[in-house]
Structure formats: structure tokens, C-alpha cells
């Protein structure tokens, strides 16, 4: 059976286009989370490097020490969460184009379209879970980042100038 325009084929093509659109949308959303996580990670690296170059806290004042080291513990927790967010990309499921090629090269159009659509739908379902994990880890990284910045600002701008 060859490809013939008609209501059935148009519906199948519409379903395929929707599945492909969904896969592309979830991949784009995942890429946005990756870029945000990478940007925050780079920012934290710069802040940590600058903070390490600043004069060390006075060893005799425990509040100064507590703020300084709590900031670094917060930054470390944030870095771990950001790395987990970026590393979730490894679990992403991509459609097997090579497998489809070998399996359906000589198959009829409708059969191939159905299998490719099914493969895309499966990919989308798995990648939604990966994306949710990436967002969860990124959100968990935000609070320690802000807390670390606040503690470092209190330490450097307030406690060391008293």
C-alpha cells in the first residue's frame, strides 16, 4: 500500500506532527533548564573564587566564622544540586533512528508512520520525567545559593567592618 492522500493519512500525519512537536518542546525546555543551571554554576564559581581571595574571617569571632563557613556549605550544596540537574540529561531518551531505519526501510508508509509516531510518544513520556527531575534539582539549588550569598554578604559587608 502506498501513500495516498485521504482523511486517514492526514490524521496519522497530524498525530505524527503533534508527537514530534511535543518531543521538540520538552527537549527545548530541558535545554533551558540546563542553561540556567550552567549559568548559576558559573556564577557560584566566580563568587567562591572571589570570596576565597577576600581576607579570612577573624579566628576569634565565632559569628564571623559561622557566617563565612555556612555560606560555603550552602554553596557546596547548591553546586551538588546543580550538577545533579545537569547530569539528569544523561537519562534522556532519544528515538532510535537507526533502529527505525533498519526495521522499516522497506515497510509501507502507514506502518512506518505509525511506528515512528509510537517511538516519539514513548520518547516524550520518558523525557517528561527527566525534565521534571532536572527542574526539581535546579529548584533545590536556588535556596542554598541565595542563602549562601546572603550569609557571605552579611559576613563581608557587616561583620568584618564592625
Image (cartoon, grey):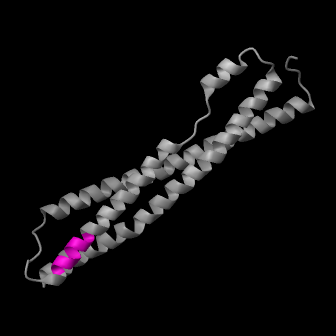
Camera-nearest residue between 134 and 6: 134
Task: Give the residues in magenta.
Answer: 64-71
Q: Does residue 143 appear anywhere in the picture? A: yes
Q: Does residue 157 appear anywhere in the picture? A: no
Quick check: 39 above or below 93?
below
Image spot of residue 131 (x, y percent): 55, 51
Image spot of residue 53 (x, y percent): 13, 61
Decide if residue 138 is on the left or right side of residue 18. Answer: left
Residue found at the very far bottom of the displayed protein? 162
Quick check: 6 above or below 67?
above
Image spot of residue 146 (x, y percent): 36, 70
Q: Is residue 31 magenta?
A: no
Please give the name of the residue rendered at 31% of the width and 57% of the height, measured from the top-left corner: 43
Please give the name of the residue rendered at 61% of the width and 50% of the height, measured from the top-left corner: 128
Residue found at the very far right of the displayed protein? 7
Please give the name of the residue rendered at 20% of the width and 73% of the height, measured from the top-left corner: 68
Image spot of residue 94 (x, y percent): 58, 36
Please give the name of the residue rendered at 18% of the width and 83% of the height, measured from the top-left corner: 63
Amino acid at each position: 500500500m502506498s501513500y495516498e492522500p485521504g482523511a486517514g493519512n492526514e490524521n496519522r500525519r497530524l498525530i505524527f506532527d503533534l508527537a514530534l512537536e511535543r518531543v521538540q518542546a520538552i527537549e527545548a525546555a530541558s535545554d533551558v533548564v540546563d542553561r540556567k543551571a550552567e549559568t548559576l554554576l558559573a556564577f557560584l564559581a566566580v563568587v567562591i573564587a572571589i570570596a576565597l581571595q577576600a581576607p579570612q574571617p577573624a579566628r576569634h569571632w565565632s559569628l564571623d566564622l559561622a557566617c563565612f563557613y555556612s555560606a560555603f556549605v550552602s554553596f557546596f550544596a547548591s553546586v551538588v544540586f546543580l550538577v545533579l540537574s545537569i547530569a539528569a540529561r544523561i537519562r534522556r531518551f532519544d528515538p532510535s533512528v537507526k533502529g527505525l531505519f533498519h526495521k522499516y526501510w522497506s515497510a509501507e508508509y502507514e506502518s512506518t508512520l505509525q511506528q515512528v509516531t509510537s517511538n516519539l510518544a514513548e520518547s516524550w513520556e520518558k523525557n517528561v520525567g527527566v525534565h521534571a527531575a532536572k527542574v526539581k534539582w535546579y529548584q533545590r539549588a536556588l535556596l542554598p545559593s541565595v542563602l549562601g550569598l546572603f550569609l557571605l554578604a552579611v559576613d563581608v559587608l557587616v561583620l568584618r567592618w564592625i
